[in-house]
Amino acid sequence: MNRIDDILTCNEALDLLEPYVDGDLSPAEAARLRSHLESCPACAAELALAERIQRELRSLPQLDCPPEIVERVRRQGAEVVPFRPRRMGLPLRVAAAAALLALSLGGGALFVRSQQQHQRERAAEIAQATAQARYALALLGRVSRRTGLDVRDEVLARRVVLPAARSISQSLSLSGVSRGAAPQPPVPDRGEQP
Amino acid sequence: MLTAFDDTARAYRSRIYSFARYLLSSREEAEDVTQEVLLRLWRHQDGVDEERLGSWLLRVTRNACYDLLRRRRSDATQALATSLDDEAAPELASAEPGPQARAEAEDFRRRLLAVLGELGEPYKSVIILREVQGLAHREIGETLGIPEVTVRVHLHRGRKKLRERLRETES
């Protein structure tokens, strides 16, 4: 093949043959190509081949689908047969495994993080509850000390002081120190005694 | 629902089968793919946009063919010309008048089908959809998910490759 003019070489012309056959060239480009082809038999022969290829391809028949395939699909579809899953290739399987692993690790990390977060939150809650309980106990203690002083004195007098006095008195009378009445401890009058 | 499926299946079954047949060069595999694609149509018929149904079906067909080609053993590859001989003999018969011209035309077609069968993607799909199936560039673009201008570029490059390989087979 030779160089015909300064504008279009054979290689350039050969690149334009298929677009030219399809009518995809601009009028100016098509004119330049025609000009080249008129004086280049080799490129003209290539154009003839390009046109023949297109003609042959366009004459290839549309092949008929066997009708029983549609009938088969209709039967399978009516029976609600699940679509047959295609077996995954190795790269897909590796990708799926990697995705599962990543999901597990991610999920595990999230779970651990969530557990740690949960523990931190619980510890804070416990600390707060403990502080509140301490405050409540302290308050209750103060209140009970104020309201329970008399009760405590009365109880002490009835349960401890009087029995102790009786015991001492009996001990003294047994030892002959005194036969007089035992000394009576002061008992607060609270109107509770009959 | 049944009628709608029947209508769609009848309208597209040969296009699906033919596309798969030229891509795979195997009648049995093309039938399997067609069945698989029509089953998908059955399952998704309510969810597919009517206007894009053709593109969707051909896209599913192409993907199913790709999956099959990836799994296929290398020795299962068939020559497209040989596999078409028994199925489309009347359509493939040359209309040339003389026996010599007829023989030459049949030889040319056989070589063309051979190089088409060996052509890589996306050129093969684009050429089958455009030249054999007669789809518009826009429809091919929708099917393959590429712009129209890319369809034209693939088409030109694919046919150029065919032309160059045909020249090689001559020598």
Image: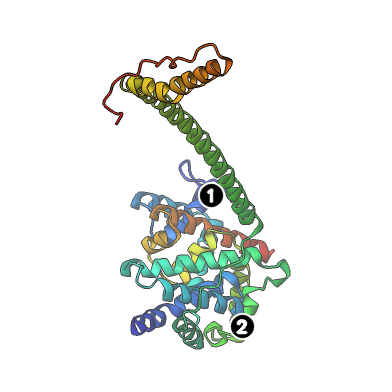
The number of numbered badges drawn on the structure is: 2
Give the percent coordinates (x, y) of residue A19: 44, 56
- Left or right of A93: which side holds A61? left
- Left or right of B51: which side holds B116? right
The colour mode here is rainbow
Is the residue B8 above or below the residue A8 in the image? Answer: below
Give the percent coordinates (x, y) of residue A180: 45, 14
Task: Give neighbour class at mark 1: few <14, some 14-19, many 20+ (Cα, 10 Å).
Answer: some
Mark carried by residue A10? 1
- The quadrant the C terminus of chain A occupies is top left
Q: Nearer the viewer, mark 2 or mark 1?
A: 2
Q: Going 58% across and 64% down the picture, which residue do you hit?
A: B67
Task: Give neighbour class at mark 2: few <14, some 14-19, many 20+ (Cα, 10 Å).
Answer: some
Q: Going 67% across and 68% down the picture, which residue do you hit?
A: B72
Give the percent coordinates (x, y) of residue A52: 51, 69
Is the residue B89 above or below the residue A31 in the image? Answer: below
Closer to the camera, B12 or A51? Answer: B12
* Chain of the residue displaying label 2: B
Q: CA distance from mark 2 to mark 1?
A: 38 Å
Using the rendered image of the protein, determine whether residue A60 is visible from the camera's viewpoint: no
Report the residue marked by disc 2: B85
Amino acid marked by disc 1: Cys
Residue A125: name its quadrant. Answer: top left
* Chain of the residue displaying label 1: A
